[in-house]
Image: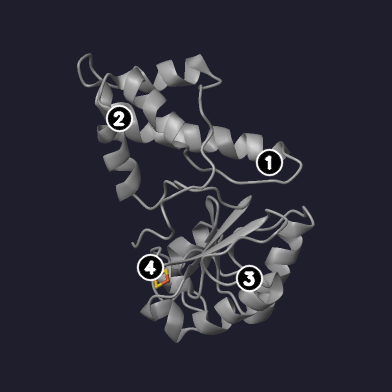
Amino acid sequence: MKKPFDQHADYQPATFKFKSKKKVEDILSRYPSGKERSAIMPLLDLAQRQVADEGAKAKKPYGGWIPRAAMDEIATIVGQPPIKVYEVATFYSMYNLAPVGKYLVQLCTTTPCWLCGSAQVVEAVEKFLKIHVGETTKDGLFTLVEVECLGACVNAPMIQVNDDYYEDLTAESVVQLLKDLKDGKKVSVGSQTGRKGSMALSGPTTLEDQAKKSGVA
Ligand code: FES
């Protein structure tokens, strides 16, 4: 998956501290003594979620991202040079190294999604939010990024917003989804047409008895 944005955040807070010492200790306790650097990835995730929690309450909201001061703090915690943390954070696309909107909208445009209409989905999203891919809305609510396959091609086209997948989208349903998020309404994750799991549009074609038993058909 490609790294979606410019890695250079204009704004960098001078310091960062984890709010929950317990959460940090819980993560460190998963790894044997001397292997603390294995905790770099979950600590980066914890930092990003802490920033997202703060951002959700801010007057102008923002989403989860990892300031350089947080990476330096993690390096201190795991006893490694900061470059070891930077290397990990800059490699994986789930770590945002620049501020993002409260809702990070990842638009999949890889071939299966494209064949099923992702171009129309992207067009509708850009038109509704009045921004282009790579930009953030002025109210701080949405950032748009284009990503490679997110592994839900069976229910293409799809997008990811923060931790959740929204599938079987159309130009109309994706706009409705964004409107509901903007209005703070509850949204249902997964298929937007009610399809269960990854069964065919016409319903299950194999393992029908099991599908009935599990209540998906
Ligand atoms: S191509 Fe979009 S999820 Fe795989």
Marking on residue 92: none
Image coordinates of residue 151 in percent, x first then y, are: 38, 64
Q: Quarter-wise, where is residue 215 in the image?
A: bottom right
The Cα–Cα distance between marks 4 and 3, rounded to whole angstroms, is 22 Å
Image coordinates of residue 193 in percent, x first then y, are: 62, 73
Quick check: 165 above or below 63?
Answer: below
Q: Residues within 10 Å of mark 3 (few under 14, many from 20)?
A: some
Give the residue type at disc 1.
Ala
Sequence-wise, which precedes: disc 2 or disc 3? 2
Pointer 1: what residue?
A: 56
Pointer 2: what residue?
A: 82
Sequence-wise, which precedes: disc 4 or disc 3? 3
Viewed as shown, does residue 87 lie left or right of 8?
left
Sequence-wise, which precedes: disc 2 or disc 4? 2
**Residue at the spot 51% in from the left edge and 22% down from the top edge:** 18
Viewed as shown, does residue 112 lie left or right of 128?
left
Mark 4 or 1: in front is 1
Q: Are marks 4 and 3 in contact (CB under 8 Å)?
A: no
Pointer 3: what residue?
A: 131
